[in-house]
Amino acid sequence: MSPQPPNPRKIAAGDHKGYMQYALAQAQLSPPASTKFSVGAVLVDADANEILSTGYSLELPRDSHGEPGTTHAEQCCLIKVAMQYGLPEERVDEVLPANTILYTTMEPCNQRLSGNRTCVDRILRLNGGVKTVYVGIREPATFVGENTGVGIQRLRDGGVGVEFVEGMEEQIMEVSMAGHGDV
């Protein structure tokens, strides 16, 4: 049995492992499938220690907001903020607090087989709206080997900090690979 995720109201400011555990709880909501990873994400106002949005793989319907393919966790976080403010996703930076950070159980994708905009591109087009991305694990080369590490470097080159939250890799991998059979 998995440990209970932390109550988001009780996660201390700067508790990166606590927020990553909450992102992992989001990932567990994603329906298992052999054709995708189960990823969770949490968008946080670091100054107010307030969760702005959460997301998980396939949370929102396929072809959401006119883009082809399935929805990724980071994408769902941003779409939900956009919907809350009645903005297109690409203008979410206009309403994000100054010190917005993103926790994601797996590194943001740098290539998508669906042709949909990558999560790295979504973060970068916010022009610094997301200051730092905290990552649980690197993406395995299961689907698109080019993702591994390239997106992280693109984020850093674009001025977005990237940090790894260590100590949960096995748990995250197990949840990420749900539906893949024996891993």
Image (spheres, rainbow, N blue to C red):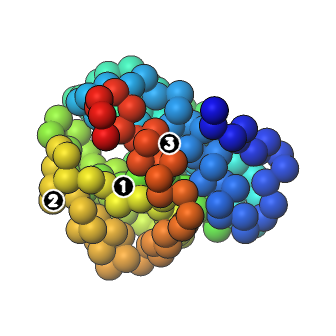
**Looking at the picture, does residue 123 appear above or below residue 142?**
below
The local secondary structure at tag 1 comes to: loop
Amino acid type, label 1? Pro
**Quarter holding residue 97:** bottom right
Amino acid type, label 2? Glu
The local secondary structure at tag 3 comes to: strand
Say whether residue 154 is left or right of residue 97.
left
Please tell me how crowded label 1 is: few (under 14), some (14-19), or many (20+) other residues with Cα within 10 Å. Answer: many
Query: Could you tell which of marks 2 and 1 lies nearer the N-terminus?
Result: 1
Q: CA distance from mark 2 to mark 1?
A: 12 Å
Which residue does the image show at 37% across and 76% down from the upper left?
156
Q: Are marks 3 and 1 in contact (CB under 8 Å)?
A: no
- Asked if residue 85 can be seen in this view, the reply is no
Look at the image and tell me in which quarter the N terminus lies. top right
Q: Where does label 3 land, which residue?
A: 40
Q: CA distance from mark 3 to mark 1?
A: 11 Å
Q: Horizontal and vertical percent for residue 55?
A: 52, 37
Which residue does the image show at 64% across and 45% down from the upper left?
22
Q: Where does label 1 land, which residue?
A: 108
Q: Horizontal and vertical percent for residue 174?
A: 43, 42
Q: Where does label 2 land, which residue?
A: 146
